[in-house]
Image: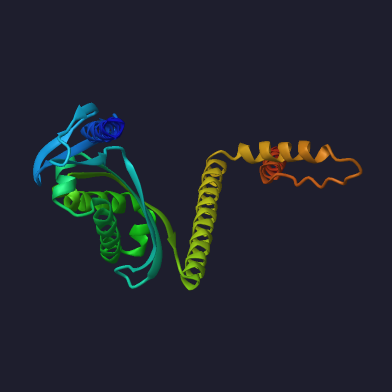
Amino acid sequence: MESLLSGLGILLIFLVIFLLAILSAAIKIVQEYERGVIFRLGRLMGPRGPGLFIIIPFVDRMVKVDLRVVTLDIPAQECITRDNVTVKINAVVYYRVIDPSRAIVQVEDFRRATWNIAQTTLRNVIGQSELDELLAHRERINEKLQRIIDEQTEPWGVKVSIVEVKDVELPQTMQRAMARQAEAEREKRAKIIHAEGEFQAAQQLAEAARVVGTEPATIQLRYLQTLTEIAVEKNSTIIFPVPIEFIRGLGLMFEDSKKPHEVQAP
């Protein structure tokens, strides 16, 4: 009798453990940023969650899918631009799952597939772009990458929101050539600015000469101004030129003084 009771007790314990295991397998909890894709006997039943729900053990299978934005780093790789320059480029891709069912059913591993598509597209786009465009218009390259990768991943329920080229590493020979080009461009701008300054100064001098030619008195004012500036200095000898107009005035006065004597001579 005691052995029978002990056997029933052990059986009851195993039954309780089995029921607890079934209950734990049936109760599922999905976080706010997750969805649980349910398969019943291999057939897709759709996503569930967030929160707590119950599935049928040994009949239903659940696969959790994270809906948060994922940062995918593309390691540096060598690419050849359209103008035959070899560069090393790395990038970063931001994507998120917008359809959990397609992300599980349409592709085996959507993370790895997205990574491979991004890596291949980066090489193709860089191969179709020139180096100057890559350096000066990087936002165009980013937009083109985002559009192409998003079109490829859309059937998988994956949305690619941002693609950014992080770093472009040039060969040493190309860096030296670009440095020489930049230096020559700076020298060119300096010479143009200097020539423009000389041209403006010549224009101002020509205008001043025109004013002096039309108004002879202005040269006298300039003489007086020069005297004022020189007189500030001490221990200096000033040689002031006599204006030609002053000499002409004296000559006219002398001629006028001679005319009466010439009339009285007869």
- 258 with respect to 140 (left or right): right
Instruction: Classify 200 as above or below 215.
Output: below
Instruction: Classify 99 as above or below 152.
Output: above
What residue appears at the point 9 percent right and 44 percent down from the top-left corner?
41
Between 126 and 251, the one nearer to me in the picture:
126
**Percent of width and height locating residue 45:** 9, 38
- 54 with respect to 126 (left or right): left
| Residue at the extreme right | 235
What residue appears at the point 33 percent right and 58 percent down from the top-left corner?
133
What residue appears at the point 32 percent right and 70 percent down from the top-left corner?
83
Between 114 and 39, the one nearer to me in the picture:
39
**Percent of width and height locating residue 64:** 25, 40
Between 220 and 230, the one nearer to me in the picture:
230
| Residue at the extreme front | 1
Between 131 and 70, the one nearer to me in the picture:
70
**Percent of width and height locating residue 85:** 37, 71
Tell me, yes or no, if residue 149 can be seen here.
yes
Location of residue 101 by image quarter: top left
Q: Quadrant of the C terminus?
A: top right
Instruction: Classify 116 as above or below 63.
Output: below
Q: Quadrant of the N terminus?
A: top left
Tell me, yes or no, if residue 99 can be seen here.
no
- 259 with respect to 30 (left or right): right
